[in-house]
Image (tube, rainbow, N blue to C red):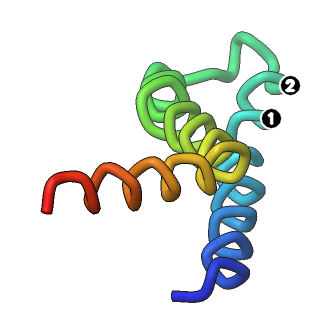
């Protein structure tokens, strides 16, 4: 997969999964079910954090993996 395609996919994942987080933050407290809290806390937030980190430092991770893979052979 090309790097530009991967970046577009990660960007859209990051944007789309941020909407439930924003909705959860700005929803009235009385209307929040526990399932929404669990989904937001354990699914959406970690995926958004990981996708953001991958967009930020993914090229460095790829370089590190490429270098460490050549040393082992």
Between 27 and 31, the residue placed more toward the observer is 27
Mark identifier at residue 22? 1
Q: Residue at x 80, y 26 (%)?
A: 27
Numbered-mark total: 2
Q: Position of residue 35 (x, y in %)?
A: 43, 29
Left or right: residue 10 compared with residue 23: left
Q: Position of residue 53 (x, y in %)?
A: 63, 39
Q: Position of residue 31 (x, y in %)?
A: 68, 22
Between 56 and 68, the residue placed more toward the observer is 68
Examine the rendered structure and indicate whether residue 28 appears above or below residue 19.
above
Q: Residue at x 52, y 22 (%)?
A: 37
Secondary element at image label 1:
helix
Check whether the beta carbons of the residues at disc 1 and disc 2 lie within 8 A of each other. Answer: yes
Between 13 and 41, the residue placed more toward the observer is 13
Left or right: residue 26 compared with residue 67: right
The label nearer to you, 1 versus 2, is 1
Residue with the most extreme top position:
29
**Residue named by callout 2:** 26
C-alpha gap between disc 1 and disc 2 = 6 Å
Examine the rendered structure and indicate whether residue 70 appears above or below residue 31.
below
Q: Residue at x 46, y 34 (%)?
A: 39
Q: Position of residue 23 (x, y in %)?
A: 78, 36
For mark 1, does the 10 Å Cα neighbourhood hold few (<14), some (14 to 19), or many (20 or more) residues? few
């Amino acid at each position: 997969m090309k790097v530009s395609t991967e970046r577009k996919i990660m960007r859209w994942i990051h944007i789309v999964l941020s909407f439930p987080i924003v909705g959860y933050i700005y929803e009235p407290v009385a209307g929040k079910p526990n399932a929404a809290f669990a989904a937001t806390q354990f699914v959406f937030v970690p995926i958004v954090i990981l996708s953001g980190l991958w967009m930020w430092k993914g090229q460095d991770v790829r370089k590190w993996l490429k270098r460490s893979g050549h040393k082992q052979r």
